[in-house]
Image (spheres, coloured by chain):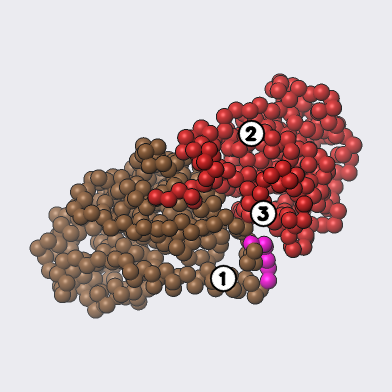
Chain colours: A brown, B red
């Protein structure tokens, strides 16, 4: 099963009602998988005129109470960002599958890359809460998709499932039965607003109400952080007491696991990127940290620095940005050169 | 009956704005539907951004005051989410013909069963007087001191060409809104209704009303596409000779909600996805 199939499987197991899309590699196959099963599973898959229509229709469906998901890649996600901000203020639940490929722009349209982490974390104007989750294999694709539905429904937020071409289209063997987190549909149709609004949904400019709204919306960050403690936000592999700690996220997982089989290293895989699992800090603090990422600027490294103050040395960053995935043998050599 | 639809929000439209007439006509049309047996919760409204959008605050119905230009996909999403909802969308001419025009063409093609009112005042009134794609040639404002250089778009022709099954234009008088609301509700499918609503501050076309005439009274055949096309050509939004009002064209065709068995089933069972337990 490949990552896209696993995401689709996860969506079905999570009780998806509606999937909207506009074709874009490498996300398109989720639409194909879900469309094939739409009659059998009784959900619906619709292709709309562009990504702007896709996300706005999704907000429309979500506020009627339907479990709604959309999928795209970086360029399509760019077009969606205004409505991501709308979902933020309206607090409508939304699951977004973002399968990356190298940018900027059309970049390398059919190759792989992890350069959209910064975008996923920051896209959309104004200040609002969203989540960014990242599976590293097919099993995690199913689990993370179900968690995305769970959090989006429970907290009325957008949850971005961040994948890439390598994960989306690589075949994996499912070794253990994925743990699916069930989620209830809790959204009800009422008056929603893109403007600041009072408790009835009418537009307001009252400073008191605006302050309260802003604080209530942002309060969710803490609530989500607390709830996220119940989930596997990061995983530890390899030699747990090693001084060498490899940090990564998403699709490089497979190559890293193969590369470190017989070397003295611990591997921390981040599955939750927003909220950032602060408990990971003690696992990496004071260690020889080696960053492995399929991007040119080390975006997870920047995230770690932002949240923990830990700066990963440039010489310890193994970055690949030619659109190709890491291969275990090459990666092993790169890691070995940086071991202490 | 319209009192149930009232809200406590104080209208901030300019005194004398034609939007008050649109609001009164819509509320009266809704009250009529409720009298006939529908519930308030059977309806939902969607508005965009612009003067028209304030209508969202003045009608006590569920829905969403959404982004500029995105009323149509939002309406479509609500219909797909719950095919039993009666969804009514409101846009301005900036919303419908500039920012979100791609959705207009596709809404005609998808033919989801919701109704769409475009408050056309031929100007960006909320941002104070910039021209829209339907402002007449030569129009000047602070941002266009050299005057508008481009022929206005003809939305009626655009909708006809896009295969829309209900293409209408009315003037923003309460009685006309009531009439067209009723006709649109009877029509199965996407209904496009342009409301000529001169902005009394920035585009005060006092001469418009006397140039209008009723297509119905002239016994226009609304099932005749060629006749509709000719009538659509009579008003080019720039030079005002005569402005035909009423239904230009009407033809029922399959609606999106019946073309997908999943949605047809929800419609049949009077359910929405929210009611589906898995």
Q: On the rendered structure, is B256 left or right of A75?
A: right
Residue in view at x 25 percent, y 74 percent: A284
Return the chain for callout 1.
A
Cα distance in 3D space between marks 1 and 2: 42 Å
Asked if labels 2 and 3 share a chain, the reply is yes
Residue B69 can be seen in this image: no
Which label sits in the foreground, 3 or 1? 3
| Label 3 crowd bin: few (<14), some (14–19), many (20+), radius 10 Å | many
Which label sits in the foreground, 1 or 2? 2
Residue A266 pos. (x, y %): 18, 68
Q: Is residue A204 magenta?
A: yes
Return the chain for callout 3.
B
Cα distance in 3D space between marks 2 and 3: 22 Å
Asked if labels 1 and 2 share a chain, the reply is no
- Circle number at residue B61: 3
Q: Is residue B35 above or below residue B111?
A: below
Residue A32 pos. (x, y %): 37, 39
Q: Quadrant of the N terminus of chain A?
A: top left
Q: On the rendered structure, is A225 left or right of A323?
A: right
Residue in view at x 57 percent, y 29 percent: B254
Q: Which residues are magenta?
A: A201-206
Front-most of residues A234 and B149: A234
Residue hosting label 1: A214
Asked if labels 3 and 1 share a chain, the reply is no
Residue hosting label 2: B188
């Amino acid at each position: 099963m490949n990552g896209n199939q696993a995401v689709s499987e996860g969506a079905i197991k999570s009780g998806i009602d509606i999937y909207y899309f506009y074709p874009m590699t490498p996300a398109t196959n989720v639409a194909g998988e879900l469309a094939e099963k739409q009659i059998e599973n009784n959900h619906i898959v619709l292709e709309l005129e562009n990504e702007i229509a896709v996300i706005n229709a999704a907000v429309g469906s979500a506020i009627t109470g339907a479990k709604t998901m959309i999928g795209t890649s970086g360029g399509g996600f760019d077009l969606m960002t205004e409505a991501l901000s709308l979902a933020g203020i309206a607090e409508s639940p939304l699951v977004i599958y973002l399968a990356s490929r190298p940018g900027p722009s059309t970049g390398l349209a059919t190759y792989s890359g992890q350069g959209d982490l910064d975008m996923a974390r920051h896209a959309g104007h104004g200040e609002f809460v969203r989540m960014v989750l990242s599976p590293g294999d097919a099993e995690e694709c199913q689990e993370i998709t179900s968690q995305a539905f769970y959090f989006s429904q429970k907290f009325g937020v957008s949850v971005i499932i961040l994948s890439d071409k390598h994960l989306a289209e690589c075949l994996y063997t499912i070794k253990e039965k994925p743990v699916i987190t069930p989620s209830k549909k809790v959204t009800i149709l009422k008056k929603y607003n893109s403007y600041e609004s009072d408790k009835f949904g009418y537009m307001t400019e009252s400073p008191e109400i605006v302050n309260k709204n802003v604080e209530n919306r942002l309060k969710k960050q803490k609530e989500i952080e607390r709830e996220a403690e119940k989930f596997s936000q990061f995983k530890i592999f390899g030699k747990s007491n090693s001084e060498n700690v490899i940090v990564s996220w998403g699709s490089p997982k497979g190559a890293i696991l193969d590369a470190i089989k017989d070397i003295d290293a611990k591997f921390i895989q981040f599955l939750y990127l927003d909220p950032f699992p602060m408990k990971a800090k003690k696992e990496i603090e004071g260690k020889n940290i080696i960053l492995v990422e399929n991007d040119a600027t080390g975006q997870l490294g920047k995230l770690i620095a932002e949240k923990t103050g830990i700066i990963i040395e440039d010489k310890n960053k193994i970055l690949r940005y030619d659109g190709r995935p890491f291969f275990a043998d090459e990666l092993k050599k790169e890691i070995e050169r940086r071991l202490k | 009956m319209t009192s149930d639809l009232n809200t406590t929000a104080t209208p901030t439209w300019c005194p004398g704005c034609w939007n008050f007439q649109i609001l009164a006509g819509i509320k009266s049309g809704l009250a009529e539907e409720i009298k006939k047996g529908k519930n308030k919760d059977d309806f939902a409204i969607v508005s965009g951004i612009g003067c028209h959008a304030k209508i969202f605050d003045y009608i006590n119905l569920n829905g969403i005051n959404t982004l500029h230009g995105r009323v149509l996909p939002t309406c479509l999403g609500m219909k797909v989410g719950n095919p039993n909802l009666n969804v009514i969308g409101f846009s301005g001419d900036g919303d419908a013909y500039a920012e979100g025009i791609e959705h207009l063409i596709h809404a005609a093609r998808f033919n989801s069963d919701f109704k769409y009112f475009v408050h056309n005042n031929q100007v960006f009134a909320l941002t104070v007087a910039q021209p829209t794609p339907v402002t007449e040639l030569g129009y000047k404002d602070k941002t266009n001191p050299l005057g508008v250089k481009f022929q206005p778009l003809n939305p009626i022709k655009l909708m006809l060409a896009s295969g829309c099954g209900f293409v209408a234009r009315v003037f923003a008088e309460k009685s006309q809104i009531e009439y067209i609301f009723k006709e649109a509700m009877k029509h199965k499918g996407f209904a496009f209704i342009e409301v000529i609503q001169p902005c009394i501050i920035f585009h005060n076309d006092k001469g418009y009303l006397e140039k209008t005439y009723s297509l119905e009274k002239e016994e226009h055949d609304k099932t005749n596409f060629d006749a509709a096309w000719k009538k659509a050509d009579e008003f080019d939004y720039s030079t005002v000779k005569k402005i035909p009002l009423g239904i230009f064209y009407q033809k029922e065709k399959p609606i999106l909600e019946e073309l997908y068995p999943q949605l047809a089933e929800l419609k049949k069972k009077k359910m929405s996805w929210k009611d589906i337990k898995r």
